[in-house]
Amino acid sequence: GRYTRSSVPTEELYVVSNLILITEVGKLLLSCVFEYFATNGEVMDSIQRNVIDRPYDALKIAIPALLYFVQNSLLYVALSNLTAPVFQVTYQAKLVTTAIVSVIMLNRKYTFQQWVCLVVLSIGVAIVVLGEQGGNSSSSKESTKTPQSLMVGLTSVTIACLSSALAGVYFEKVVKTSSAGEKQKPVSVWMRNMQLAFFTIVIALLRQAYLSAVKTSQEESKPFFHGFTTWAWILVFLQAGGGLLVAAIIKYADNVLKGLATGVSVCFATAVSTVLFGTPLSSQFSLGAAMILVSVYFFSNPVSKKEKKTSSVPVASNPASPERDAEMTKTLLPK
């Protein structure tokens, strides 16, 4: 994503909201394709059965779509009021927040070791991201002309973390418990992803209509596909495919494991960036990557407690037999 923005002049940049909208359309189309194969070509019957005949069940997915919209909106507010290091460090709290929400909503249980691993992994991701941004600080400096409010920024990033956690855990609960106790077939993860993409597109279109009405930005005057180069379309495809993978992970694993995988992907993406774009690796990246990998390992592999060995005292066989006592008495008596 960064390469698609940094490799072109400023006037040729695409509008981020347009890219997000096209990505959601891609998710919707790909979900339709997977649902087509999952239902043996009966995708229209699936839409009839799971959307038209059960509108209230489909409307449940509007909740995580709205929460994701709140999250994305507040992230822009947080970025405008916090420096990049403070934002990256505080935003990594979303993994621990997701675990806490999972405990509350899904009755999950985590050991003390796993909680420590989650905290260390969040710190490791922050170190890696900060190290990557530190390498670019010489070429691009933040503009400090706009006034910043630390309280507004921290409040925004806190609510954004909570919205992300609630949306992910709620979507996981809906996907895993849909149609429980009902005679109908359970709703597939692809149909749920279709519903989520649809509501996200509706919210994005409403947002764009509002921005076009008030004309708050010069970017709104650009054509819709302005700046969509080949790399931008590749990014759309990767984001759309990644969204489907996330839905599958939530279905067959959980949100916390998704967070662990995201931490590993940060290390992998930085390593690939080094190979493809010559991004230098620093000692800060090595430290953060080590923290991430060690945390992921110990989260899945609890340390076995050594059992205390009880000292065994050898016991003599027949320690006090009557025959032996009689012989000892005879030897002690005077003759």
Image (cartoon, grey):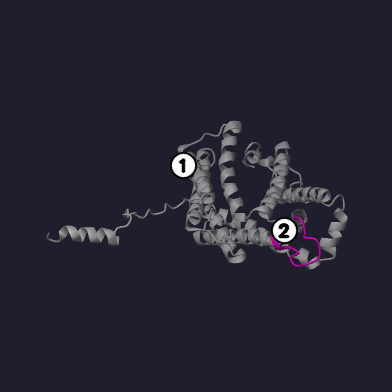
Question: What span is in magenta?
Answer: 175-188
Q: Residues within 10 Å of mark 1 (few under 14, many from 20)?
A: some
Foreground pick, 276 / 295: 295
Q: Is residue 283 left or right of residue 244?
A: left
Residue that badge 1 annotates: 287
Percent x, y of residue 42: 87, 53
Q: Residues within 10 Å of mark 2 (few under 14, many from 20)?
A: some
Give the vertical position of 181 relative to 96 (above or below): below
Q: Is residue 186 magenta?
A: yes
**CA distance separating discs 1 and 2:** 41 Å
| Tag 1: amino acid | Leu
Q: Quadrant of residue 163?
A: bottom right
The quarter of the picture where the N terminus appears is top right
Res. 70 in view: no
| Tag 2: amino acid | Arg
Residue that badge 2 annotates: 207
Percent x, y of residue 37: 82, 48
Q: Quadrant of residue 178?
A: bottom right
Q: Is residue 129 left or right of residue 27?
A: left
Foreground pick, 47 / 277: 47
